[in-house]
Amino acid sequence: MKATSLIASLLVAASLSAASLTVQAEDNPQKTVEPSNINNRDLKVGDRAPGILVRKESAIGDWEKRGLKQPAEDSQWARVNDRYVLVKITNGTILDITPTK
């Protein structure tokens, strides 16, 4: 009798776990990544720039070819949509904004 109830319990547990795996497999996760609000923000000289503009990978290396003035040692040019933004790396302050040509 003990063996029968043990087998029945195991079968119930196995069927419940299989049902839950099936339900999880069919669940479509919601997209949680939202677009950056940097494009919606009105950037002004003197404002603090979004952190992404201070990163090295955002720096424009060929600033001279684009007709931009040379950035100071602690500054860099970055592009935001149709504008070039000169950002001070040390504190994130926007020093200049120039439209793209």
Image (cartoon, helix red, strand yellow):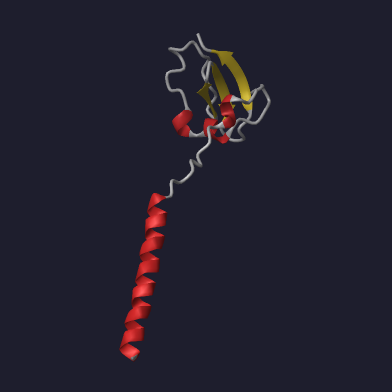
Query: Which quadrant holds the N terminus?
Result: bottom left
Q: Residue furthest right?
A: 46
Say above or below: 31 vs 59: below
What residue sits 57% from the left and 14% below the top?
Answer: 98
Q: Looking at the image, which is closer to me, 96 or 69? A: 96
What residue sits 52% from the left and 12% below the top?
Answer: 100
Say above or below: 94 vs 23: above
Q: Looking at the image, which is closer to me, 94 or 25? A: 25
Q: Residue furthest bottom?
A: 1
| x and y, in percent, of residue 84 in the image | 54, 18
11 relative position to 50: left or right = left
Say above or below: 21 vs 75: below
| x and y, in percent, of residue 51 in the image | 56, 35
Q: Looking at the image, which is closer to me, 57 or 5? A: 5
Q: Residue furthest top?
A: 101
What residue sits 35% from the left and 77% below the top?
Answer: 10
Residue 8 position by quadrant = bottom left
What residue sits 60% from the left and 18% below the top?
Answer: 97
Count the marks: 0
Say above or below: 100 vs 18: above
57 relative position to 3: left or right = right
| x and y, in percent, of residue 17 in the image | 38, 66
